[in-house]
Amino acid sequence: MSPPENALVAAALALPLLAGCGGAQPTARPEQVAERQQPPLVVASAAAASAPPAVSAAPPAPRVTTMSLARGDGAPADAALARGDRALDDDDLAVAERSFGEAARLAPGDPAPRVGLARVAVARAGVPYALASAPKHEGLTRVAAELLALSKAHPTYGPAAVELGRVRILLGEPEPALAALRRGAELLPAVAEAQSLLGLAEAATGALDDAVRALAAAARLDPRDPARHTNLGAVLMTRGDGRAALAAYDAALALAPDSARALSGKATVLLAGGDAKAAAPLLERALVAEPKRAAHWTNLSYARLALGDADGAVKAAEQAISLDRSFVSAHLNLGLALAKKKQWDRARRAFEAARALDPDDPRVKANLEELEQLRRAKPR
């Protein structure tokens, strides 16, 4: 099964574009910015309020998979579990439900079929895997209660604890979710997905060091899966460890050279290090795979502007806005690019659009004030 992806939060660096009198432009400064397409699972600390950036991060979204419930012991119930696992991976929820139901009838005391049925119910809820993406969801609340009872009845069965933690993430219950996922990871130390889910939950509560340890364990246990490396890279980037994040993204790209998640993540780290020249082609490649992702276009607009291509920056920012008009950073990038072209009125309109979306964003105020100073400055 391929659950909806959320979007993880990442850091990006916006460089000073031009400085001085007369030809000066509003400048961009470092900050951590979230893509707003889905609720973030990984939360980064904000930078100084006085630092208005011109770049939005293009955070890769963590991939969530399911662990096999079948044990391979050849029993009829186990064969039904295997059919349910395969059906769930294929998003055939009707077959999955029938198969897990059959396994439950054949082995009424086995907790595995009930975990399978809980997974089907979660899949049918159709909510993205993100912290508090479905608070007070009645169906998921019932599933959580059933899984809690199952975990208490079978305290050594790791998949029940992991599934309980996963559901509590969706419900917006981070502490109970962490408790369940830690228990699941303890019971399943050699299962990559148990470690991965724990890492993502640790990151959601800001425990980035713990998150890195768990996600690194997942990557070691499952080194052939590029998603393990991109998940690790995203949290390393959020923690500010650019060199290690680059290594994680490079490991992912060695396995999946066209992965938009890895390409955009590596590009964001490079932007954070001031290497727009290397970042731009990576973003262009990411856009081949994900042409409708506003964050990629926003970061590409910044990269182009940093490289002196104001026209290209305008086009990329406008494309980002056409995909997501409520993306504040896209409007800011558009304003910066127009200011570089000395199109003051259009630049002001772009900054005003950003202010209408978020009146409290300190970046907006700083850029509007600087723009007004530039307009009033007498040419030398």
Image (tube, helix red, strand yellow):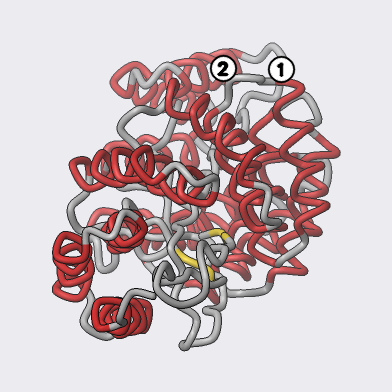
> Which residue is the site of mark 2?
82
Position of residue 319 in the picture relative to residue 143 (left or right):
left
Q: Secondary structure at mark 1?
A: loop
Q: Secondary structure at mark 2?
A: helix
Quick check: 102 above or below 55? Answer: above
Q: Position of residue 28 (x, y in %)?
A: 48, 69
Q: Position of residue 242 (x, y in %)?
A: 76, 56
Residue type of the residue flagged with mark 1: Gly
Tell me the crowding category of disc 1: few under 14, some 14 to 19, or many 20 or more residues within 10 angstroms, Cα based.
few
What's the distance in space between the residues labelled 2 and 1, CA to CA?
A: 8 Å
- The quadrant in which residue 366 appears is bottom left
Quick check: 74 above or below 334? Answer: above
Looking at the image, the residue that sits furthest to the front is 380
Q: 213 or 8, which is in the foreground? A: 8
**Which residue appears at 60% of the width and 68% of the height?**
178
Quick check: 50 above or below 166? Answer: below
Q: Position of residue 363 (x, y in %)?
A: 37, 77
Q: 337 or 212, which is in the foreground? A: 337
Residue type of the residue flagged with mark 2: Ala
Is residue 198 visible in the rendered image? The answer is no
Q: 8 or 180, which is in the foreground? A: 8
Q: Position of residue 70 (x, y in %)?
A: 63, 24
**Which residue appears at 33% of the width and 74% of the height?**
379
Q: Which mark is residue 183?
A: none
* Mark 2 or mark 1, earlier in chain: 1
Tell me the crowding category of disc 2: few under 14, some 14 to 19, or many 20 or more residues within 10 angstroms, Cα based.
many
Q: Contact, CB < 8 Å: mark 2 with mark 1?
A: yes
**Which residue appears at 64% of the width and 63% of the height?**
238
Q: 128 or 37, which is in the foreground? A: 37
Is residue 58 visible in the rendered image? The answer is yes
> Which residue is the site of mark 1?
72
Position of residue 375 in the picture relative to residue 293 (left or right):
left
